[in-house]
Amino acid sequence: MLKLPGLIDPHVHLREPGQTHKEDWDSGTSAALAGGVTMVLAMPNTKPPICDESTLDLVLASAKAKARCDYAQFLGAGPDNVDWDKYAGLPHRAAGLKMYLDSTFGELRLDDMTLWQSHFQNWPKGLPIVAHSESRSMAAVILMAAIYDRPVHIAHISLKEEVLLIKAAKERGIKVTCEVCPHHLFLTSPLPSGEGPGVRANGRLEVRPRLATQADVDALWANLDVIDCFATDHAPHTLAEKDGENPPPGFPGVETLLPLLLTAVAEGRLTINHIIQKSVINPQKIFNLPVQSEIWVEVDEKAAYELRAADMHSRCGWTPFEGWQVKGRVTRVVLRGREAFKDGKILVEPGYGKNVREK
């Protein structure tokens, strides 16, 4: 058995409040544990979005009652909450501030760049800012980080131009970090509509940022040293939604993260140290997270099997990696000294998860 520290996923969507038919804190954190993830940072583009004290209280009450792994919750940057001085203590209760600056699922997109500036100026120093920003908007938000001399973390990079720009920014001392998702490392853009798998399958490949070309994927692999974190952007929608008209963007992913990465280790594309650095050490540092004690994951690294949604815990009931052959199965997870998962079964009750921002 391979023994790993509990993984941290700094980018998940648990769909509560407002869309619990897709996922909730119970099902999403169960999926996390089954995937060897012992801490998740949840995104704020729920219904309603998490932007103030009342909505943060609402979502944290659900998490306290239901979460089975440890967690923290992001606040969303909106047009009405730029004066963070009015929200005494609220930012310190959150995982960080999430800024949506490009096409996404939900109501939180910020198009006015003066609002970007206000959030960079007013969000408390020392607390994380995460940006969903792609291509040119990513260049603009890196400029903001340079102007205001504060760190920014770029979510789910997917393009060659993005990883090369981040590399150049780091070389010049700009305080930028970034993450990559498994689907941007292992999948490429689908064929044009009307070719290949057809519209139905293409709906299941809708995600933001979109899947990119093989050249982009190759550039991400070639520049792994630039990438700070692995993150899933676990964003579940039901199959009925994905196969319907106007399919919403997003994939489930928290339960397939570690098997995919371990398969890449078996193929010589990654090392175990890469996984620990980018899924434990760097997220702790970037998001000021506590070091987890008495927490570990046991993996049968020789187990070869097929990924099947029917065996998974997410409420959405599907995976873009259906039928993939992988090597490395999570067999046991210990969370704060207690056996939380073993041989396919979740062993801790709803509410066992701990809010890591709570003193």
Image: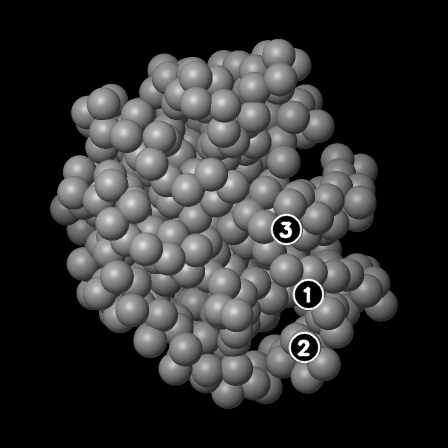
**Circle 1 Cα neighbour tier, 10 Å, few/some/many (<14 / 14–19 / ≥20):** some
Residue with the mark numbered 1: 292
- Residue identifier under label 2: 336
Q: Residues within 10 Å of mark 2 (few under 14, many from 20)?
A: some
Q: Is residue 142 above or below residue 189?
A: above
Tag 1: residue type? Gln
The residue tagged with tag 2: helix, strand or loop? loop
Q: Position of residue 353 (x, y in %)?
A: 52, 76
Q: Position of residue 313 (x, y in %)?
A: 47, 72
Q: Nearer the viewer, residue 67 or 97?
A: 97
Q: Residue at x 62, y 31 (%)?
A: 227
Nearest the viewer among 348 and 98 is 98
The answer to whether residue 31 is seen in the rendering is no
Q: Relative to 225, does residue 165 appear above or below in the rendering?
A: above
Q: Secondary structure at mark 1?
A: loop
Q: Which residue is mark 3?
A: 284
Query: Which residue occupies 40% across, 21% down?
Result: 144
Q: Quadrant of residue 84?
A: top left
Q: Are marks 1 and 2 in contact (CB under 8 Å)?
A: yes
Disc 3 element: helix
58 over 227 or under it: above or below: below
> In percent of the image, x 28 and y 30: which residue is there?
118
